[in-house]
Image: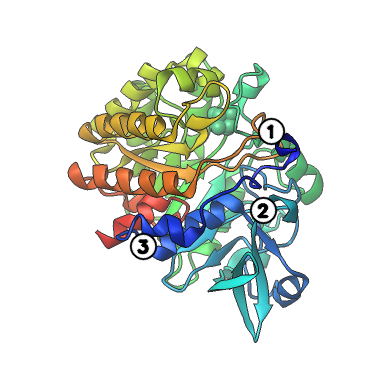
Amino acid sequence: MVALLKPHFRAEAPFDEVLAAHPAFPRLIARKIDVQRRGVHYTPAAEAAIDPAIHQLRSPYIFGSRDGAIKPLPESLLLRDGTTILVDPTPLEQDPYVVDHRDGRFVLLDGGVEVETVDLWPKPAYYDKLTSSGIKMSLLVSARPQRLNVFQSSYCYFWADKAGCRFCDIVTHTKQQREEMGVPTRLRPEDVRETIAEAIKEPGRFTNLCLTAGSVTKGAEIFDQEVEFYIELLQSIGSLFKTRRFPSQLIGSAFNERQLRRLHEETGLSSYTTDLEVLNEAVFNWVCPGKARQVGYREWKERLVRAVGIFGRGNVGTGLVGGVELARPHGFKTEADALAATLAEADWLGERGVTTVYIVWVPRPGSEFHDQQAPSLDYYLRLAQGLQDIRARHGLTVDFDDYRRCGNHPDSDLARLQ
Ligand code: SF4
């Protein structure tokens, strides 16, 4: 019978038991990780209490949700210490946490037991406004706690070669967003500029901008066209600021030195991230076949290190889909081996000024890994602490990707405590 059970139905140690083995790990950050691992389901009472006039609902995102649906549900939950939980609505049969509304407050239930009070993000003031071209601004720029996200285009050319990353659903989700929400496939710089100009009028809310998109492999040299798109967009956004540089993060492909210099010199960009996703060459080759074929694991790492020479220590990062290194059948066989290999590589990068953050792997229905299962809570606690310890050891900060700006990396949640 076991083979017929859905993911998340395997026997797992209870939350308190796992946390007892990590007495120094903050309880609320551990809760965030567990909620992200298992997802959430909103009860009818919770759905009825959501107020679209004041709560931030799910806006366009580069990846889809665990239930494969686009519904007007909250973008995120907020814990009582300010920790955010960006989390997907998840079918009940996958044993998610449950969000209910009781006695005038939202609560988080695990196995029917109330474990936390939660809040919802407040809706940004610009969300209901329209650009002069008539597009709803929330479809162009979405908000994180204190950051504005611009998903410049949602197509990835690795998919065109049938070599997209196996955990990724960007293209299936793009199609769904375009059809159901009317999200433009590629954003016009004037629309983005106008939206950001409106967003930053809200006092005290936004302190950073993040640009990302799928990889565009086209151009005289690979990624030239992607760089061109970003330069155009960053120049347009930059005209809103009086200073030469403005707080910003670009999560792009692994650009060569010439491309990185152009971004640094021709725009006000202040930090650069390119995601390795998996810190092991053999597993990377399997999980990210397009990246492996067109750039290669070692070259991707070297490009990160070269970026430090341009953007400076602490301004260059790489992101991992934490846990995907254990995907079956070619990932690591044990959590201990996966953790040791990942932290050793992150340490190598940290020594060279590159910071590593992770997101919790969600096996999404539109991805090739849709029927897989993320690893244990214990694994994620060790990974978060390990990455933060590496940052501390090498004197690296992660301000452009911390709990205020991004809120999606459990390891950088720890950075505010140390
Ligand atoms: S590079 Fe990989 S993870 Fe990024 S959008 Fe393309 S397929 Fe998805």
- Residue under label 1, please give it: 171
Q: Residues within 10 Å of mark 3 (few under 14, many from 20)?
A: some
Q: Which mark is residue 139?
A: 2
Residue ranking furthest to the front: 1
**Which numbered mark, 2 or 3, is in the foreground of this view?**
3
Give the colour scheme of this rendering.
rainbow
Horizontal side of 410 relative to 161 (left or right) equals left
Instruction: Point out the image quarter for the N terminus.
Output: top right
Query: For the residue labelled by badge 2, is the local secondary structure a helix, a strand or a loop?
Result: helix
**Which numbered mark, 2 or 1, is in the foreground of this view?**
1
- Residue under label 3, please give it: 26
Counting residues from the start of the chain, the first of labels 1 and 3 encountered is 3
Distance between the Cα atoms at labels 2 and 1?
17 Å
Residue 196 visible in the displayed image: no
Which amino acid does the dot numbered 3 rest on? Answer: Pro
Residue 414 visible in the displayed image: yes
User: In what quadrant does ligand 1 lie?
Assistant: top right
